[in-house]
Amino acid sequence: MIPLEEAQAEVLAACGPLPARRVALDGALGLTLAEDVDAAEAVPPFRNTAMDGFALHAADVASAAADRPVRLKVIGTLGAGRAPSTGVGRGEALRIMTGALFPDGADAVAIVEDTRTDGDTVEVLAPARPGAHIRAAGDDIAAGQALFPAGTLLGPGHLGVLCSVGGQDVMAVPAPAVGVLSTGDELVEGGGPLEPGQIRDSNRRTLLSLLARDGFRPVDLGIARDDEEIIETALRAGAESCDAVLTSGGVSMGDYDYVKAVLNRIGRMRWMQIAIRPAKPFAFGVIGSTPVFGLPGNPVSSMVSYELLARPGLRRRAGRPDADLHRRPVPAVVDDGGWRGARDGRTGYVRVSTRIGDDGRLRVVSSGGQGSHQLYAMAQADALAISPPGVDVGPGDAVDVLRLTP
Ligand code: AMP
Ligand code: MG
């Protein structure tokens, strides 16, 4: 058996980032920025009012009070999106709405709550501080300012900022297209009756969904029978058309584990026995230059293998920086129950549910059956507790967990 870290290093070495290309902003969510971006424009682009009210001269209303209102002449109304036709003189007020371009001459806003309108005059009931409620041009973003460095993960706010400075597209690393192939004579698609010995293919739906969750582009390659020729055809097509391929099944020690044989022939592969439980068998290599992950067939194993090995490699392919490839272990406390550490030197990845305790600490309990075929408990889990070999764990014990958030 080899340590998990050795397998992860092998994966990362063969998962180079895809070449960056220009991407329209409406397709850029979740991608990694491949250039440093500066602001082409200032935001806001002009001085404007932050409140509904009246633009006026602060000096005119310095003595205003509820019982001694100051009366000013209203020279017009200005909504957002319009330009004022004149400036504001002494003794005058311009009614303005939030976001409206702030007129010349005026230096203060009397908010609408501090005023009483009367025909074409307004009574101001409180002083207005010069500059208050006025947003200067560029007070969010200055023109020419450095915005986001290469490596930024583009989220909704980043895309909004890029729009606000007039951006249309960015250089970004595209999301890798990842093919998913199930293998096995026992597998059935869809909802028809099961013949004896058959099971339904669940791995493909799970893996396609994990890929979608993580912002990759899932590509369904279907089910391949346990037949060398069929598996070879499917793998060649997948490696040709995708940026990476995930297979499940056919990589352990069974008589019909042909995935191994085919990949050996058409790819440069390494077969690994990793010192983890579940997901000990794992194959990884390349067909041409396309990384291929041979995940184990057991449903929990294929998911754990995805989380620990495929996901980091695919994130690297998607341009994520090295510091952002793996989930970081966070400390937690076992709430209730517990589990035995493996006696065969393997590190356990125990399916657990988390909650925040009254003391603010993260608390975990086993989410159910821990067999590598028991997908139900994996579905209920929101974290994997890292269980060192030989160490039994009970209530109150400290454990590190990997939270399975997107
Ligand atoms: P294998 O690695 O092909 O020997 O498969 C190990 C176990 O996982 C067997 O019990 C298979 O029936 C099961 N298995 C393999 N592929 C799938 C799949 N796509 N969906 C559900 N179970 C599977
Ligand atoms: Mg099989």
Image (cartoon, helix red, strand yellow):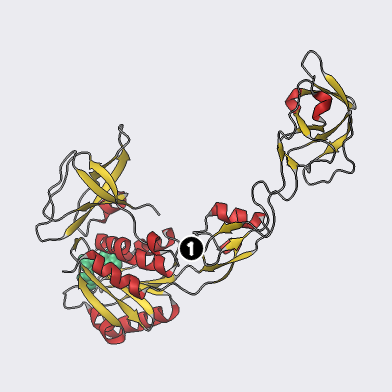
* Side of 220 where 27 appears, left or right: right
Task: Residue 247 in the image: state x and y as whole percent.
Answer: 32, 72
Callout 1 secondary element: loop
Is residue 97 at least partly visible in the picture?
A: yes
Q: Residue at x 77, y 42 (%)?
A: 100
Residue nearer the viewer, 40 or 406? 40
Indicate the quadrant where residue 103 lies: top right
Ligand 1's quadrant is bottom left
Q: Residue at x 24, y 74 (%)?
A: 250
Task: Residue 151 in the image: state x and y as whole percent.
Answer: 48, 63
Picture quarter with the N terminus: bottom left
Task: Residue 406 in the image: state x and y as whole percent.
Answer: 40, 54
Q: Is residue 379 above or below residue 126?
A: below
Q: How many marks?
A: 1
* Side of 158 where 116 appears, left or right: right
Is residue 201 at least partly visible in the picture?
A: no
What residue does disc 1 label? 151
